[in-house]
Amino acid sequence: MSFGRPSNSVFSLGGAPPLKGSFPLDHEGECKEYMTRYLKCMKDNKQQSTECRHLSKSYLACRMDKGLMERTDWDALGFQEGVDASAKPKHQQGPTESGR
């Protein structure tokens, strides 16, 4: 490769985005509250997602409701149908943020 002149390889600047795994960023912060709760839960639980699944589902529901991602069956996202996204496991119920 020499500097200052074009290379011999041909490449394209255009292309199509991937079908899965790519979605619009939440520039307006419409679902930021859900994301913040999830990240706090992950930090509080030493990055173990099991305790935070209900928050993850709430975040994804917000993104689907706001058109920030395509509506997808919960089973395809790894959630069981009929499990309430807002329900907290009994061991996590306790004082609210302001009560700490």
Image (spheres, rainbow, N blue to C red):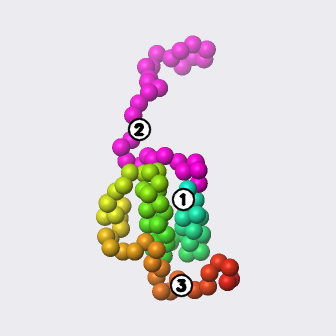
Q: Position of residue 80 (x, y in %)?
A: 32, 70
Residue shown at the point (50%, 86%) measured from the top left: 91
Per the image, the residue denoted by label 1 is: 31
Per the image, the residue denoted by label 3 is: 93
Q: Residues within 10 Å of mark 1 (few under 14, many from 20)?
A: some
Q: Is residue 2 left or right of residue 51?
A: right
Q: Residues within 10 Å of mark 3 (few under 14, many from 20)?
A: few
> Of residues 12 and 85, which is closer to you in this image?
85
Mark 2 or mark 3: name the one nearer the start of the chain: 2
Quarter of the figure that contains the N terminus: top right
Could you tell me how far apart the alpha carbons at marks 2 and 3 are, in whole angstroms? 41 Å
| Three-letter amino acid code of the residue under disc 1 | Cys
Q: Which mark is residue 71?
A: none
| Three-letter amino acid code of the residue under disc 3 | Gln
Could you tell me how far apart the alpha carbons at marks 1 and 2 are, in whole angstroms? 23 Å
Q: SS class of the residue under badge 3? A: loop
Q: Position of residue 18 (x, y in %)?
A: 39, 41
Q: SS class of the residue under badge 1? A: loop
Please say if 98 is above or below 62.
below
Q: In the rendered structure, does residue 18 fall within the stretch colored magenta? A: yes
